[in-house]
Image: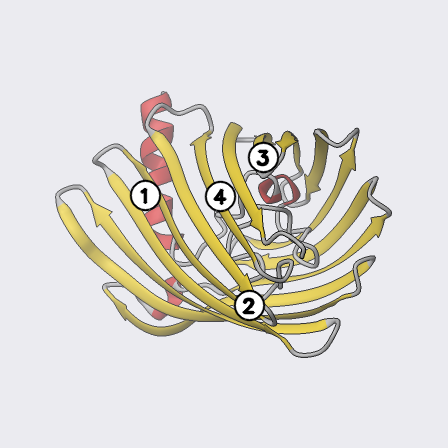
Amino acid sequence: MRLLITILILISLVFTSTSAYNDKPDFGVISSVFSGADIAMPSEGSGLLINPGYPLTEHSYNLSCNYTNHYNIAGLNSNSITSRLSIGRYVLGAEYAGFGKNNLYGENNFRISGGVRLHKHFYAGLMYEYLSLDIGSYTNYASFGSIGFSGGYNNGTLGIAASVSGIKLNSKNIGDEEINKLYLGGLSYRIANLSTLYLCFGSHSPGEWLGLGQSISLNQIVSIHLGLRSKPTTPAMGISLSQGFIRIGYSYRYHPVLGDTHQAGLILNLKRKEE
């Protein structure tokens, strides 16, 4: 029975995977708890999909690595590595994300991005994504190139942002009806250094959804993260531990039909020392 479910999931992914949300977002171990709700103030280690133009602290470097097992199905895993470099007003990003089931099916996503601070609190960004699909012994059976944009406002307490990805540039063996854009728009509000509240609206091929989330700092080391997504109602929770420039995290999401998804991540956050 589990094998049948796995095959059905993979078949659906073949036809809906291009730049897809598919309940398997490359958002990062903390951001995945919120289903995109932290778009206006992305969490440390967030993927480029959520907000490619978001400015980091000036003169900083962020590297995150994530591993996910989907629905407790052996071999149905994804991995991602995201790198962001901030120099003054500008931020550059590069990302690889892979997803698949052993040798049956595989996705390889490559993304690059650039962002610029337009004003003290306003910013904008651009992302290019290339996706290739491997099906069985057919390597690069299908491919898809697209661009995305993001922009927003952030004054340190209040954040407002929107993004769109999956705007087609070219494709191979993928029809236009199989290419779906991902839209995100959200608000964030930070309460001192104690907690941050998140709200977003998202739209993709499965439909529209609302995402809610909250991060709570228990102390300088431990933070907990809570999230809820509609359609279907998907609760999520996570925990992260910080020490110096290292942060490790774990998140759990429960899909009412498909079951459990577990994700673990490592985040390195390097900043230039103040003179």
What residue is pinned by disc 2? 164
Residue ID for mark 4: 64
Q: Which residue is mark 3?
A: 247
> Is residue 47 placed above or below 222 in the rendered structure?
below
Q: Secondary structure at mark 3?
A: strand
What amino acid type is highlighted by mark number 4?
Ser
**Left or right side of 20 for 239:** right
Q: Is residue 256 visible?
A: no
- Secondary structure at badge 1 equals helix
Residue 141: give x, y in percent of width and height: 19, 55
Q: Amino acid at mark 1?
A: Ile
Labelled pair 1, 4 in contact (Cβ < 8 Å):
no
Quadrant in which residue 34 is drawn: top right
First in residue order: circle 2 vs circle 4: 4
Q: Position of residue 213 (x, y in %)?
A: 74, 43
Q: Judging from the image, what secondary structure is the residue with disc 2 in? A: strand
| Cα distance in 3D space between marks 1 and 2 | 26 Å
Q: Secondary structure at mark 4?
A: strand
Q: Position of residue 42 (x, y in %)?
A: 64, 53
Outermost residue toward the front? 275
Hey, what amino acid is under mark 3?
A: Arg
* Pointer 4 with pointer 3, Cβ within 8 A: no
Is residue 228 depicted above or below 121 in this figure? above
Q: Which of the two residues, 218 or 37, is positioned nearer the viewer here?
A: 218
Labels 3 & 1 near each other (Cβ < 8 A)? no
Q: Residue at x 82, y 50 (%)?
A: 190
Amino acid residing under circle 2: Val
Q: Earlier in the sequence, mark 1 or mark 4?
A: 1
